Image (cartoon, rainbow, N blue to C red):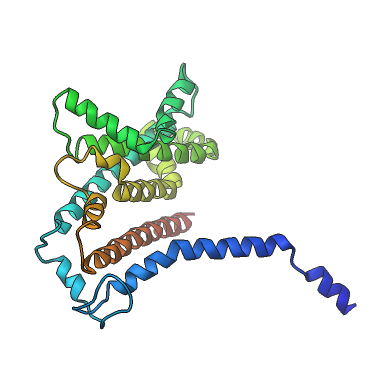
Amino acid sequence: MAMSRKTRERRPTSFYFLAAFFTLFVLFLYGPMLTIFILSFQGVNGGLTFPMNGFSFHWFGNLFERQAVGDFGGSFLRSLKLGLIVMVVTVVVSFMAGLAFRRRFKGDSIVFYLAIASLIVPSILISLGIGLLFNIIEWQPQWFTSALGAHLTWTFPFGLLIMFAVFNRFDPSYEEAARDLGASNWQTIQYVVLPMVGPSLIGVAMFSFTLSYDEFARTLMTAGALNTLPLEIYGMTTNVTTPVLYALGTVTTGFSFLVIALALGSVAILRMRKGQKA
């Protein structure tokens, strides 16, 4: 009886294969991050590799000093501003497009495929094409013009697909009930639609911000003379000989996790308010 139970509870071979694959995935994902995190706390005389020569916060303080090899503060602020602008535009346009595509209209399939076509085009070609276009029309590429457009070609299709999935599951009877009670179209959107799709909009905001904040390929030819943070980090890899680069990586990774935590906190607050109203 015990043998049959043990035989019945034996895990299949696929379980161990998937477990090994997942272990390798975690190592490849978090191993480099952990290495950079540890080396960012090198001592004052520490180098770029192990073994560590002491422990200090020296290189974090060095980030806020004037650097001979890069502009950390300026590039970070530019990436932050660009990410926030992309986030707002993506959320607003994706929400409006999601509402528009709830009803069929002539040419809707063509519009849809044109909107998401940039997902299958290599990012470097998008960047090169926008950069060449600005040169042809004799406009100077800038992070807030050409780079903004390049980033929106990356974030908007994702936002659009997310909102399509959300509205496909949305029950229109709630809107009908609101209109029956005398609500206008705007009041229906404000008090019924937005609260119900609010968590999804926060997800779109977080997704679009992180995509823009970390984007390198679509910024390479479109940022102009002023680098964003990914371009600055890439440029630093060829001439930085101190762990200040690792300190920068630790700070930016922590910032990304902070954005995720804020987004999750916002979703939790919305759900709590929704539960209280119910």
Asked whether, in this view, residue 217 is left or right of residue 276, the answer is left
Q: Position of residue 61 (x, y in %)?
A: 16, 72
Q: Position of residue 65 (x, y in %)?
A: 11, 66
Asked whether, in this view, residue 86 is left or right of residue 102, the answer is left
Figure check: 70 above or below 31: above
Q: Where is residue 35 in the image (x, y as percent from the top left)?
A: 37, 70
Q: Quadrant of the N terminus?
A: bottom right
Q: Which residue is drawn at 9% across and 63% down?
A: 66
Q: Residue 190 or 49: which is nearer the viewer?
A: 49
Q: Residue 215 or 188: which is nearer the viewer?
A: 215
Q: Is residue 146 visible?
A: yes
Figure check: 186 above or below 21: above
Q: Which residue is drawn at 11% across and 62% down?
A: 67
User: Can you tell which quarter of the image residue 92 is in?
Assistant: top left
Q: Residue at x 39, y 65 (%)?
A: 32
Q: Where is residue 24 in the image (x, y as percent from the top left)?
A: 53, 63
Which residue is the extreme one toward the bottom? 54
Q: What is the total number of numbered labels drawn onto the structure image? A: 0
Q: Residue at x 88, y 73 (%)?
A: 4
Q: Is residue 187 visible?
A: no
Which residue is the extreme one toward the right? 1
